[in-house]
């Protein structure tokens, strides 16, 4: 891959288009690959469809590879998993908000005392650093949920967030998977 895509900003640079403004949206901003693939409201449905297709493939893989001691909750609200959310130093509103969180997967092994919160994201991967930044954002976004699961941590469980980051062009950053 050369990293060159026929978006308006590129087409203008090579003299094929008169302007770099997006053709598909009412917003008057230059069209770049990141803008087109990650931000443009016109293509939100396509992004959701691509996300759901990846979700399906990964769910199939998890179903095939997870052993019997793991329970998988796909796109389930935390409140519907039976997990206990702690209220120490949190208000009832905080607990309700955490209960409404809906990561792509919550994996629970009572036998191994492990909880994995797994969430898929497909950011722009024009620059490798964008993948790591997306992983960090996911970690930070789900940290309050990890804190809310302190009931388990206090009993020796391991609770971990696994951001599953696949760039818009299919790139992955092995740093956050190790």
Image: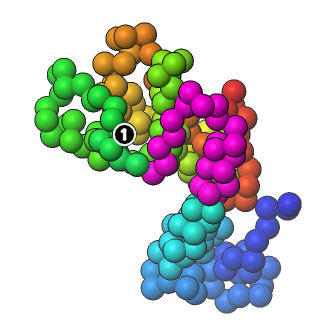
Residue 158 highlighted magenta (yes or no):
no
Q: How is the image coloured?
A: rainbow
Which percent across, then down, holds residue 9?
A: 67, 75
Judge whether 96 appears above or below 15 on screen. Answer: above
**Count of numbered badges drawn on the protein:** 1
Q: Position of residue 54 (x, y in %)?
A: 64, 57
Q: Position of residue 22 (x, y in %)?
A: 57, 81
Image: 117 above or below 45: above
Q: Is residue 68 left or right of residue 79?
A: right
Say if residue 28 shows up in the picture.
no
Residue shown at the point (44%, 16%) measured from the top left? 157
Looking at this rendering, what residue extends furthest in the right direction?
1
Relative side of 77 to 46, left or right: left
Tell me what residue is drawn at x 40 percent, y 39 percent. 141
Q: Which residues are magenta?
A: 54-75
| Relative vertical location of residue 166 with respect to residue 142 in this rendering, above or below | below
Q: Confirm whether residue 148 shows in the render.
A: yes
Q: Quadrant for residue 7, please give it.
A: bottom right
Residue 64 sits inside the magenta stretch: yes
- Front residue of this view, candidates 138 and 115: 115
Tell me where residue 2 appears, x and y as whole percent: 85, 61
| Outermost left residue | 92
Residue at screen point 67% across, 55% down: 57
Where does the C terminus fall, quadrant-wise?
top right
How many residues crowd mark 1 within 10 Å: few (<14), some (14–19), many (20+)?
some
Residue topped by disc 1: 81
Most extreme residue toward the front is 68
Front one among 25 and 99: 99
Q: Secondary structure at mark 1?
A: loop
Snapshot quadrant of residue 90: top left
Residue at (37, 18) in percent of width and height: 152
């Amino acid at each position: 891959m050369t990293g060159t895509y026929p978006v308006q900003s590129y087409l203008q640079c090579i003299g094929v288009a008169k302007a770099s403004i997006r053709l598909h949206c009412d917003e008057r901003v230059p069209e770049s690959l990141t803008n087109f693939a990650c931000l443009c409201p016109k293509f939100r449905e396509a992004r959701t469809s691509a996300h759901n297709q990846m979700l399906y493939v990964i769910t199939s893989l998890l179903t095939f590879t997870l052993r019997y001691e793991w329970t998988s909750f796909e796109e389930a609200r935390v409140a519907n998993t039976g997990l206990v959310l702690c209220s120490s130093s949190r208000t009832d509103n905080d607990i309700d908000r955490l209960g409404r969180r809906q990561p792509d997967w919550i994996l629970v092994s009572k036998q191994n005392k492990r909880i994995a919160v797994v969430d898929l994201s497909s950011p722009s991967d024009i620059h490798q650093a964008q993948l790591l930044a997306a992983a960090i954002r996911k970690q930070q976004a789900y940290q309050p949920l990890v804190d809310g699961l302190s009931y388990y941590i206090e009993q020796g469980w391991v609770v971990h967030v696994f951001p599953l980051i696949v760039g818009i062009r299919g790139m992955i950053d092995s740093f956050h998977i190790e």
